[in-house]
Image (tube, helix red, strand yellow):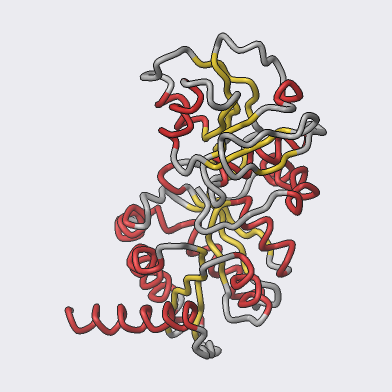
Amino acid sequence: MINLWMQTYCRFTFVLLAMFFGLTHTVQSDTLTIGTISSEPVGDIKTFAPFANFLAEKLIDDGVDEVQVVIAPDIKQMVGMLKQQEIDLFIDSSITASIINKLSGSQFMLRRWKKGRAKYRSVIFVAESSDIQQISDLRGKIIAFEEPFSTSGYVLPALAILQSQNQLHQLERLSSFPVAEEIGFIMAYDSETQMVWLERDLVAAAAMSEDDYLEYVQSVLIPMRVLHTTAYVPYHVVVHRSGLEENLIKRIRQVLKTAHEDKEGAEVLNRFERTTKFDEIPDDLLQEIKRLEPFLGDVSINQSAGQ
């Protein structure tokens, strides 16, 4: 058992090193490859390994001998691998996946209930005493986002601001002066810092996932008020590359959609970041992603694993 684990781990580690150090990796025709984007590749290899092994067992009669995991450091590299058919399935946040689809030709496949969550949204909030009543009132002021690779702490609220016909520009430091007719933003790099800056009146607003906000607002020093709530989007999704065999796509869909129905599958999914199940992406959530697509190019995304 130990030897089997070591062989599997070494195989996945080789794929990891290939992606990060530019080694040539040719995917065999009987190998299915799952990809994601992360700045912590070793940890994600361990996270994905049991799920990949489970999928390999289920697809052995469908001509798939093994399932490998590939971790890319950024969107650009993942797009390149999908175009070159070095990645068959991509699993990540729905907004990241939307960008990947647009650039590589991949397509949405299923929704993943990561950590039991089917969908999520973000909030932009201010101090309760603030005279800011709408997003346009933030012009000439500063909003604190979480970090560049956070879907809920940056991308979703930034897209909401752009959708409301307002412009964003990034500031390097809190002491910088925003442009009068635009909304300046700065990265706090964690939610606690966002709250401290807002409490101390160093920024006019902040943004994070609704769940995080509801948790933090219980212990803040001053009352807060939600200024804007974004639309819901799927939390995580699975997409498949362009050109993947239709029969294989159908079989993978079947395996994933039924994985939670037996004890073994449910246990594997739970170990995979507490995934509850995979199901179809509701049409209303897909339509919301499509409404955001025209603005994706205006949001600078230096994105690793989306949250």
Near-viewer residue (21 or 215): 21
Left or right: residue 258 versus residue 231 is: left
Q: Residue furthest left?
A: 2
Residue 82: give x, y in percent of width and height.
63, 75
Residue 150: give x, y in percent of width and height.
53, 47
Look at 68% across and 67% down and name the residue there: 106
Look at 43% across and 34% down and name the residue there: 193
Left or right: residue 263 versus residue 81 is: left
Look at 70% across and 62% down and name the residue there: 101
Q: Is residue 139 above or below residue 223?
A: below
Q: Residue 136 sits in which quadrant?
A: top right
Residue 166: give x, y in percent of width and height.
79, 33
Q: Is residue 11 above or below residue 294?
A: below
Look at 63% across and 38% down and name the residue there: 185
Q: Residue 159 sits in which quadrant?
A: top right
Q: Is residue 133 above or below residue 251?
A: above
**Quadrant location of the N terminus?**
bottom left
Near-viewer residue (189 or 211): 189
